[in-house]
Image (tube, rainbow, N blue to C red):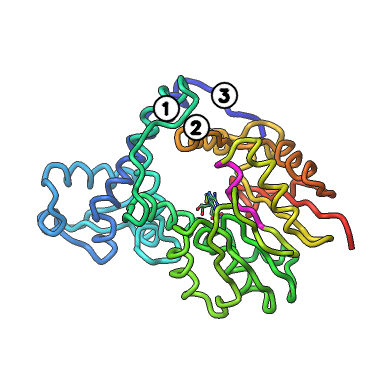
């Protein structure tokens, strides 16, 4: 796809975009959007209920009005009807956890130049083992909510069948595995992830009739065995967190866990789905610079290379996961049978 020309208007739109982002984050962080999802209210009521400064609230409301998120009628503020589902906690389209997760990363992104100089993420305090971590909870819930949008209907495209056992490697809250099993009676699945992800998986599992066909296997994929053999391995949004060497090793390990004739699917923000670097995936690469030691967005050929080095054949890029999505799917087959 041809890139649009870079001119003064594009520069200004891009440079100022973070003001709008931060207004959205503040709407969720202050509890304002969740409160408005319950019904309209005056500024005075909102300021009192949410313990917000009147001037701060007024300026935020006006900005959100200009962004098309809220509207005012006779002194009462409400979410615009077309925005309401996006900000209503628990709705199918709820984006609030994605916004909280993005908001958590702003301080680190503000130090991007430092990351570019050092080639490494900024130092930040890590939560201790077992200590509650709101950013981590936001992260897993954001992954969950994005997956809930993408997973429905995918099982058919992946050709999943009764009697197969699928490994969802780095599956986190398990939305993909749970949706695949729901859409494919007789399919079994294992979600493999760090112990910290298990509580998020358990919460999600309760929502799915038949969710007991999915088991959670806690472990570190760098060190621990993955189990198997599996007929299908699904590796979604995991490789971008690792450098090329670790990706080679992980894809090789996953391929060894596949049964002969088994299929590996990799979902990633492919850097060059149409041959040229794509905007979202390219910026996501910077997100990995800010957040990981060696992660990045990968080109189609790099992802294919990990799969071929692991001995997989018929390796191909099969297009975006869903139309218009920045994520795409790679497929490879383990020879045999
Ligand atoms: C970006 S999330 C993707 C989650 C899910 N696959 C999806 O597509 O929504 C990356 C996942 O990899 C998991 N992960 C990271 N390092 C891991 C490790 N060393 N062993 C197992 N899982 C790991 C994280 O806990 C997280 O659930």
Question: What quarter of the picture does the C terminus occupy?
Answer: bottom right
Relative placement, left or right, of 24 versus 117 is left
In percent of the image, x 75 and y 59: which residue is there? 258
Question: What quarter of the picture does the N terminus occupy?
Answer: top right
Residue 285 sits in which quadrant? top right
Q: Which residue is mark 3?
A: 5
Measured Cα–Cα span from mark 1 to mark 3: 25 Å
How many residues crowd mark 3 within 10 Å: few (<14), some (14–19), many (20+)? few
Tell which of 250 and 108 is nearer to you: 250
Q: Are marks 2 and 1 in contact (CB under 8 Å)?
A: yes
- Judge depth for marks 3 and 2 and give the one in front: 2
Region rendered in magenta: 234-241
In percent of the image, x 27 and y 46: which residue is there? 26
Tell which of 197 and 290 is nearer to you: 197
Secondary structure beneath dot 1 equals helix
Name the N-terminal-most of marks 1 and 3: 3
Q: Which residue is mark 1?
A: 112
In the rendered image, residue 271, in percent from the top left (x then y), is placed at 63, 36
How many residues crowd mark 2 within 10 Å: few (<14), some (14–19), many (20+)? many
In percent of the image, x 81 and y 54: which residue is there? 333
Tell which of 234 and 222 is nearer to you: 222
In the rendered image, residue 254, in percent from the top left (x then y), is placed at 70, 53
Relative placement, left or right, of 42 versus 158 is left
């Amino acid at each position: 796809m041809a890139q649009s020309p870079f001119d003064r208007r594009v520069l200004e739109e891009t440079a100022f975009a973070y003001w709008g982002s931060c207004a959205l984050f503040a709407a969720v962080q202050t509890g304002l959007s969740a409160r408005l999802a319950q019904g309209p209210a005056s500024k005075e009521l909102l300021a009192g209920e949410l313990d917000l400064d009147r001037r701060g609230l007024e300026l935020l409301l006006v900005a959100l009005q200009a962004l098309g998120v809220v509207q005012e009628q006779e002194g009462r503020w409400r979410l615009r009807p077309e925005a309401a589902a996006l900000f209503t906690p628990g709705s199918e389209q709820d984006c609030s956890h994605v916004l909280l997760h993005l908001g958590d990363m702003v301080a680190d992104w503000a130090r991007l130049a430092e990351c570019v100089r050092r080639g490494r993420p900024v130092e930040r305090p890590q939560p201790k083992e077992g200590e509650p971590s709101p950013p981590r909870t936001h992260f897993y819930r954001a992954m969950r909510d994005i997956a809930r949008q993408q997973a429905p209907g995918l099982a058919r495209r992946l050709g999943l069948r009764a009697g197969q056992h699928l490994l969802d490697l780095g599956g986190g809250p398990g939305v993909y595995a749970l949706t695949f099993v729901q859409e494919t009676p007789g399919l079994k699945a294992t979600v493999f992830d760090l112990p910290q992800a298990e509580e998020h998986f358990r919460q999600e599992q309760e929502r799915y009739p038949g969710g007991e066909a999915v088991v959670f296997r806690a472990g570190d994929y760098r060190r621990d065995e993955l189990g198997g053999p599996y007929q299908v391995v699904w590796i979604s949004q995991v490789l971008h967190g690792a450098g090329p060497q670790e990706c080679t090793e992980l894809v090789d390990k996953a391929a060894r866990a596949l049964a002969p004739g088994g299929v590996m699917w990799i979902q990633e923000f492919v850097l060059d789905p149409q041959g040229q670097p794509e905007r979202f995936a390219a910026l996501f690469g910077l997100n990995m610079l800010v957040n990981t030691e060696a992660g990045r967005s990968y080109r189609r050929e790099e992802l294919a290379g990990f799969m071929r080095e692991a001995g997989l054949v018929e390796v191909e890029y099969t297009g975006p996961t869903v139309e218009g999505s920045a994520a795409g799917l790679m497929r490879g087959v383990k020879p045999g049978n």
